[in-house]
Image (tube, rainbow, N blue to C red):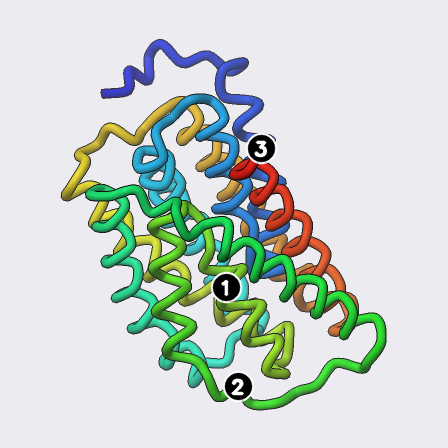
Amino acid sequence: MLDLSTIGLLDVLPFIAVGFAAQLVDGALGMAFGVISNTLLISLGIPPAAASAGVHMVESFTTAASGISHAAHKNVDWRLFSRLVIPGVIGGILGAYVLTQVDAEVARPVVLAYLSAIGLYLLWRGIKYPPADGKPKVIAPLGLAGGFLDAAGGGGWGPVVTSNLLVQGANPRKVIGTVSVAEFFLTVTISATFIATLGPEAFTVATIGLLLGGVMAAPAGAVVAKRVPTKGLLVMVGVILTLTSLYGIYRVLG
């Protein structure tokens, strides 16, 4: 159990900075908090299951703040939300259980390669063509896959769901806001599943720092998503998705 009395400001400060930056990107683009934070915790030697549990506990708070802000700025398509959230929660429960029982990293390079290709496509489309405002047709399977990969891999809801909805021509601002709100219900469910299987072992100095930084940055992301032009959002999503996925492949294969 973490002893809060032994934690100093210098111990927490670097993780506050990482949490702030990761949540600012996540709130504005609908992805990256889990990927960035989970990568950091694992690189510090925290086991994958504990790292994923800690990140999702933090995201329970950051996604609540981010979701409220997106809703206030009218960035949410509530019909799309209703079709995403239940499959996402089911996938999250399955992924959290699998991660505590077996090694789910086997498929990670394949998923990352797929996301890299999607990122390059979004970047190309954002530069070459005006953004569309279509109605996505494949929604529930995306929620199920995104929830599973998010829990099993410590991050994946935003990259999988946001990117694939954008590929189907949905409005970037509405997609980012909707995915962010749905993520709150996903992270609460995943956190509860991890607590039931692991106990409170995931709370570390890093978890506390990520929580503080993430909550501070959460309201700003919705403002960025609302004010940045649609084409700019599409390009930024493509860049972030490609870079984080390629880095993930490098870490897995390196």
Q: Which residue is mark 3?
A: 254
Report the front residue among 49 and 183.
49
Q: Amino acid type of disc 3?
A: Gly
Farthest right residue in view? 128
Q: Amino acid type of disc 2?
A: Pro
N-terminal of the pair, mark 2 or mark 3, is: 2
Farthest left residue in view? 196
Report the front residue among 84 and 91.
91
Above or below, comparing residue 40 to residue 215 in the picture: above
| Circle 3 SS class | loop
Q: Nearer the viewer, mark 3 or mark 1?
A: 3
Residue at x-position 49% and y-position 43%: 215
Q: Position of residue 194 (x, y in %)?
A: 23, 44
Q: Position of residue 188 (x, y in %)?
A: 29, 53
Q: Which residue is mark 1?
A: 160
Residue at x-position 74% and y-position 81%: 131
Q: Residues within 10 Å of mark 1 (few under 14, many from 20)?
A: many
C-alpha span from label 2 to label 3: 36 Å
N-terminal of the pair, mark 1 or mark 2, is: 2
